[in-house]
Structures are given as structure tokens and as C-alpha cells.
Image (spheres, helix red, strand yellow):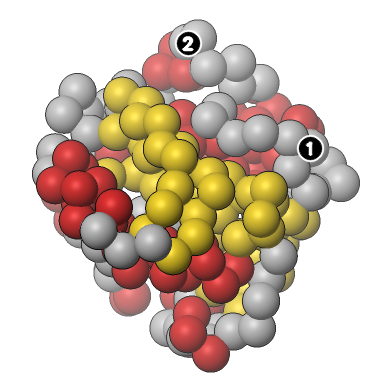
Amino acid sequence: MSYEVFKGLDVSRETFSRLETYVELVRRWNPKINLVSRNSLIDIWSRHILDSVQVYRCSDVFHNWVDLGSGGGFPGMVCAIMAIEEAPEARFTFVESDQRKSAFLRSVARECGANCSIVSKRIESVDFLNADILSARALADLPTLLSFCDRHLKESGTALLPKGASWKKELNDARKEWNFYCEPITSLTEPQAVILRIKGVSRG
């Protein structure tokens, strides 16, 4: 994949090299544990890597980043790889109940040098994680995600939640139960999709 895919996103050559290592590991493990669909594996750089880098670029200054339902590591592991150079003191926590996917994430962290820990439990059973940034991709509807934010996000923290074309309906549904500030940021990889940048979550 050409380094030019990240034009305008300020990704260093060193980080790009680590992302190449990550992609190779996804391709190696995917036939065994189905980290991503076969079709999206063909377009992994745009569908998964670039899509995750743009989530990282929406973040504030942070020390503790929590990624829920991490699966194959999108966006969390990509963000952790970005932070190796840009926020070396920051810590990432991935919550992933599937043991095989957790083993994959640990392997990637070792190979790429990412500063992260993997919690192999269900999100509902994990103690308060005190996140500065909380991310989750293709995990649940927005009202459910906000209940996770209410539990795991600092009062001053920010949630970064990629959503597809139906994001406005989810937003309206969520406002029936929750109070929050939301800034929709148009996706670079899919014009109908957004990253919801959410703060101030409380029950309505």
C-alpha cells in the first residue's frame, strides 16, 4: 500500500511501517479467527486502517484511552500504534471478551511495541476504566454505547464513535434517554458516515 493514502493525516514513515506489520498480522490470523470480513480484507487500508487513523485525529490530549469491543483492533490498535510516537506516555486498554481475538491483540501489541493492555471480559462486568478517550466501532447502537460511556468515561472525557449512514436516527433515539454534546465529523472514507465526538454524557 502506498504511504500516500495518509496524505494530510500526518502519519510518519515509522508509524506507517508499524501499520504494515499490523496489516500483515491481520492477514495471517484472519483465516483462523475471522477478524474482518474477506471482502473488507481486500480494502483493509481504506476500510480499516485509514478509517481508524481519522478517529485518532479527532482525539483531545489524553493519558488513558479505552477501546470497547476491540475485535481485530479497529480503531483501538491503530490509535495505539499512532500514539507510540505521538503520545508515548499514554496507555490503551482494550476490552474484548473473545479469547482468541484477545490473543491476537496481545500478539500485535508485542510485534508493534504498542503500550496497551487487553481485558478479556464482557464490557458490563469490567470495573470503571476512567477513560479520557473512549472509542468503539461497529459494537452497538448509540443509546447502548452511551450507557458504556456513562460507566467508563471520565466526566471530562470524550467518546469517539464511528457511525454509518443511519447515524441521525441513532442520535435522535439516544437523545430520548441521554443528555450529551455531540459534534458529527464527516468520515474521510465514507461520505454518509461520521465520527460522533461526544462529551458530557448524563442520563436524561
Q: Amino acid at mark 2?
A: Lys
Dot 1 or dot 2, earlier in sequence: 2
Residue 181 horizontal/vertical position (percent): 45, 40
- Under circle 1, the secondary element is loop
| Above or below for 38 versus 164 | below
Q: Is residue 88 left or right of residue 203?
A: right
Residue 26 location, quadrant: bottom left
Image quadrant where residue 5 sits: top left
Q: Nearer the viewer, residue 53 or 105?
A: 53
Q: Where is residue 140? Give x, y as percent.
A: 28, 65
Disc 2: which residue: 7
* Quadrant showing the C terminus: bottom left
Which x, y percent locates residue 196?
38, 39
The crowd level at tag 2 (other Cα within 10 Å; few <14, some 14-19, many 20+) is: few
Return the x and y of residue 47 as percentages of the image width and height. 28, 38
One can see residue 73 in this view: no
Q: Residues within 10 Å of mark 1 (few under 14, many from 20)?
A: some
Q: Residue at x 83, y 42 (%)?
A: 88
* Label 2 residue SS: loop
In the rendered structure, are the residues bearing label 1 and label 2 in contact, judged by CB atoms less than 8 Å apart?
A: no
| Three-letter amino acid code of the residue under disc 1 | Ala
Residue at point 52%, 66% (across, down): 150
Q: Is residue 123 above or below residue 165?
A: below
Residue position for label 1? 87
Query: What residue do we see at 19% from left, 56% from top?
Result: 173
* In the image: residue 80, left or right of residue 135: right
Judge whether 85 appears above or below 95 on screen. above
Residue at 66% over, 55% down: 155
Q: Nearer the viewer, mark 1 or mark 2?
A: 1
